[in-house]
Each structure stands twice: as structure tokens, then as C-alpha cells.
Image (cartoon, rainbow, N blue to C red):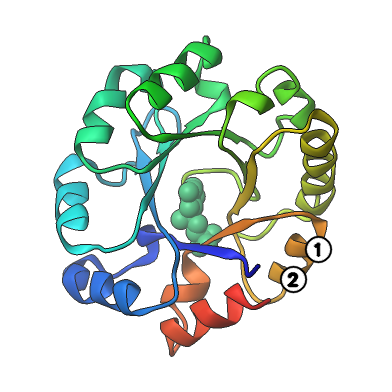
């Protein structure tokens, strides 16, 4: 099975949003990664429901929504209404993660938990069987175009081992600094899905880059 590729819209040209969405529709991208930032959980503000509405109207691909916001429970229904198919919430932003995961599933979305680079995978021991995916941050969240953190390879292996040991049915996705230099090693370590922003949208041929990353 080839890797699942989820290009991050954060690196797209928003002046040409329609063309960028068409490009992704015509590409081999599996999902579209949507980075929502609130300026509190992370030191940046991206976009919200109006942009997602346009995206949902024009895109044929499932929306893989990454919430970098405090108290995500307040907005679960709104994100389902805005068209999220997968909802990623940060471990560090949820006091009652089990309840949050249940609420996401109740709304009919896939539930994913995201870990910041400093958060050990062992924190997921009691929840990994309840989630559809774990998103490991390979940069500190908040910005596109940052450098990949090398410790991520070991982290992916540890998470893969936990998923197998627990017989959990859960994908591993990696987000941040992903490009052709690390994609195949991430796959070997156990990654199922990769987010790619800068490496896709700054490529001279984004569609070809998506294909190359998928076949890593
Ligand atoms: C960072 C975001 C990422 C980002 C990835 O906070 O979660 O999804 O857009 O961009 P690149 O691939 O450029 O690191
Ligand atoms: Zn992201």
C-alpha cells in the first residue's frame, strides 16, 4: 500500500485558492490537511470556517483537519458542519481526551490525537485503542516550512510497537518538515500518512511531488 499523502493547505497561495484546490483535486493526494490555529495554543492564527466552507464546496478529497486550538470540545459540531472528515485534536489541549474522542466519533468523524514533539508516545497507552489515528508533530506546531525534528523516526517506531502490542486499529500520520529526504525512512519506521506543506507547494511541479512522496 502506498503512503497516504495529505498536502497542507497552509502553504498554498490563498490568492489562488480555487486553482490550488483544483490542483489537489487533480493530484494523487488522498486527503487535504487543514491547519486551524487560534493564536493561543500556538503563536499564529491561520483560518477558520469561511475558508473551510469554500474548501468543502470545491474539494473532492476528505478533509484532515488539524486543530491547534485550546478547548476544541467547544467547536466539534461546527467542524463537522464545516465538512471535516478527520478531526485531529492535540493531547496537550484536552483535559478530558477520552470524552473529546467520543464526541468526535459521535458526530460521525474519524477521531485523531496529535502529540507535540516533546510529548512521549507512552501518554497514549490508555487511549490508543479508541482513536482512528495518531498525528505525530515533527516540528513545533504553528508554522509551515520548518525543519524536521530527527527524533521523530524513533518516536514513530515506538508508537508502531505500541499499536501492534495493543492490537489497535490506528493509523500513524506525521506532520512537519516532511519532504523526499525523510519520507521513505518515516514509512520504514511505520508511518501510514504524511502531511506535506512547503515541499509540495514550493515544488515546481506540485502534482509530481505529491506522487513522488506517495511512492517514497
Ligand atoms: C504546522 C502545521 C503543519 C504545516 C506543515 O503547525 O501543523 O501542517 O503546515 O508544513 P510543512 O510541511 O511546510 O512543515
Ligand atoms: Zn498540521
Q: Is residue 60 left or right of residue 121?
A: left
Residue at x 24%, y 75% (from the top left corner): 22
The relative height of residue 68 versus residue 104 in the rendered view (above or below) is below
Image location of residue 113, percent across then percent down: 56, 32
Q: Secondary structure at mark 1?
A: helix
- The tally of labels here is 2
Residue at x 47%, y 45% (from the top left corner): 142
Q: Secondary structure at mark 2?
A: helix
Q: Nearer the viewer, residue 210 or 176?
A: 210
Circle 2 packing at 10 Å, graded few (<14), some (14-19), many (20+), is some
Q: For residue 44, say whether it is visible.
A: no
Question: On the image, numbered disc 2 is attached to which residue?
Answer: 184
Q: Marks 1 and 2: in contact by CB < 8 Å?
A: yes
| Snapshot quadrant of residue 42 | top left
Q: Is mark 2 within 8 Å of ligand 1?
A: no
Q: Nearer the viewer, residue 85 or 213?
A: 85
Image location of residue 66, percent across then percent down: 43, 42
Q: Is residue 38 left or right of residue 96?
A: left
Residue at x 32%, y 79% (from the top left corner): 26
Which disc number belongs to residue 64? none
Q: Nearer the viewer, residue 155 or 193?
A: 193
Image location of residue 57, percent across then percent down: 15, 57
The relative height of residue 44 versus residue 3 in the rendered view (above or below) is above
Question: On the image, numbered disc 1 is attached to which residue?
Answer: 188
Circle 1 packing at 10 Å, graded few (<14), some (14-19), many (20+), is few
The relative height of residue 199 versus residue 88 in the rendered view (above or below) is below
User: Which quarter of the image is occupied by the C terminus?
Assistant: bottom right
Image location of residue 126, percent across then percent down: 71, 17
Amino acid at each position: 500500500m502506498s503512503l497516504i499523502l495529505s498536502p497542507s493547505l497552509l502553504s498554498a497561495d490563498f490568492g489562488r485558492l480555487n486553482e490550488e484546490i483544483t490542483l489537489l483535486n487533480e493530484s494523487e493526494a488522498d486527503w487535504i490537511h487543514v491547519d486551524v490555529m487560534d493564536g493561543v495554543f500556538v503563536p499564529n492564527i491561520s483560518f477558520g470556517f469561511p475558508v473551510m466552507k469554500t474548501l468543502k464546496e470545491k474539494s473532492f478529497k476528505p478533509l484532515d483537519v488539524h486543530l491547534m486550538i485550546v478547548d476544541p470540545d467547544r467547536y466539534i459540531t461546527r467542524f463537522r458542519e464545516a465538512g471535516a472528515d478527520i478531526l485531529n485534536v492535540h493531547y496537550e489541549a484536552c483535559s478530558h481526551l477520552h470524552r473529546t474522542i467520543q464526541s468526535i466519533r459521535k458526530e460521525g468523524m474519524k477521531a485523531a490525537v496529535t502529540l507535540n514533539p516533546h510529548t512521549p508516545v507512552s501518554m497514549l497507552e490508555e487511549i490508543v485503542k479508541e482513536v482512528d489515528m495518531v498525528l505525530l508533530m515533527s516540528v513545533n506546531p504553528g508554522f509551515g516550512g520548518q525543519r524536521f525534528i530527527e527524533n521523530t523516526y524513533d518516536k514513530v517506531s515506538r508508537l508502531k510497537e505500541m499499536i501492534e502490542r495493543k492490537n489497535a486499529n490506528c493509523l500513524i500520520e506525521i506532520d512537519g518538515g516532511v519532504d523526499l529526504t525523510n519520507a521513505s525512512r518515516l514509512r520504514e519506521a511505520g508511518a501510514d500518512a504524511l502531511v506535506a506543506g512547503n515541499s509540495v507547494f514550493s515544488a515546481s511541479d506540485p502534482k509530481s511531488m505529491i506522487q513522488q512522496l506517495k511512492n517514497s
